[in-house]
Amino acid sequence: MFNWFTQVAAITLANLRTLPERRGAACAAAVGIAGVVTVLVGVLSIAEGFRRAMTVSGAPDVALVLRSGADAEMTSGLSREDTRIIADAPGLARDGAGPLASPELFVIINLPKRSTGTDANVPLRGVSPAAFPVRGHLRLVAGRSFEPGRNELVVGAGAARQFAGLDLGRTLRVGQNEWTVVGIFTAGGGVAESEIWTDAAVLQPAYHRGDTYQAVYARLSSSGDFAVFRDALTTNPRLNVKVVRQADFYAEQSTAVTGFIRGLGVVIAGLMALGALFGALNTMYSSVSARTREIATLRALGFGSGPVVVSVLLESLALALAGGAVGAALAYFAFDGFTTSTINWQTFSQVAFAFRVSPQLLGRAIVWAAAIGVLGGLFPAIHAARIPIAAALRET
């Protein structure tokens, strides 16, 4: 066994030493694989960034109450009496100002994108004073919060970056009213950073919503109180509601978009990988062809066919991993943290988010590169092991 590994090491080192003589073909194969990895990581980082923006805000001790049968806030509706009953439910956290439950409205407005000037749907949310302590992770980074009863807005940092007219101190005309941007907040990169917030009591008459809301966000005393809170509301004959964890709701909201982007990324990368695979095959066949006499000499000296196969595979794998590492580095520096926005198909509104190149994503891309390298070297390796020794030694 030791002799077998010694043969593999000797042939592999000899193969790698000759790479400079074949640098053109070797670089072409590595660059092709680097391109596959860059594209794969780039596209999948979009899905990863969108998923993170949708789920990072989902706290296990925050519940969302919607009308029964509604799958999004836009299709839900709750009366003021409904919100009062919800605020009295067991399991709900309270502070000095009362129960931590925020009845909210969700409407869509049109604003131009800073980058293109084209109009996009931006969520405008009417909230109660409890909205900030309910979320918990929100933080004002500029200005102040809106004053109840006034046409004032606080804007998520993502929305402020992506859409025109949302700078601090600017006046924004929405519908028949004018609103002033008085603050900018962050939400840890979560979906709330794509929203504009104002007082729900001001937004209701502005959009002729009367005395109704669409959802209630509620902070629980603990995540373990969710079942108590849910059962108290869903069994109450005066209510017709469903209760979900905020984390589960946002995760479901992100499924369609992330699934589509991931599928598209795999298809594009798969097509590119096919081209890179042919490049690797060509490179390794050329490598074997250039070393026919050398391989035959080694076989004549007693080297087995197994070490020859493994050595060619290792050479191909080394080229693939080098290309994969370069592609992964390019993707990380080019895409990680890049900010943009896309539409959330559940609400048809824009979600601002940052591309996210995670370690898991880089690891997956390296696995793709390794697979291309192994497949690209397999058939040339088998060919190398089957070269007739006598015929190869007679070649000039």
Image: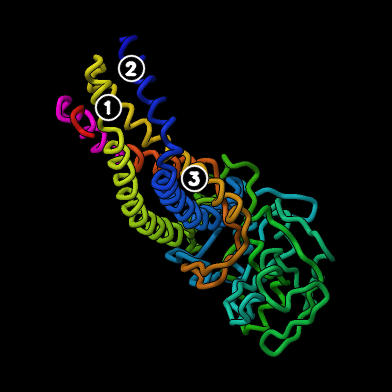
Tell which circle, 1 or 3, labels the residue nearer the N-terminal end. Answer: 1
| Quadrant location of the C terminus in the rendered image | top left
Nearer the viewer's eye, disc 1 or disc 2?
A: 1
Q: Which residues are magenta?
A: 375-392
**Residue 355 against residue 281 in the figure, above or below:** below
Nearest the eye: 114 or 103: 114
- At a point 76% along the width and 81% down the height, the residue shown is 179
Which mark, residue 295? 1
Does the rendering let one see residue 243? no
Identify residue for label 3: 361
Q: Which residue is mark 2?
A: 7
The question of residue 44 being in magenta is answered with no
Alpha carbon separation for disc pair 1 and 2 = 12 Å
Select label 1 or label 3 by which is in front. Answer: 1
Instruction: Residue type at mark 3: give it.
Output: Leu
Q: Look at 15% across and 25% down and name the residue there.
A: 390
Disc 2 residue type?
Answer: Gln
Q: Position of residue 87 (x, y in %)?
A: 64, 57
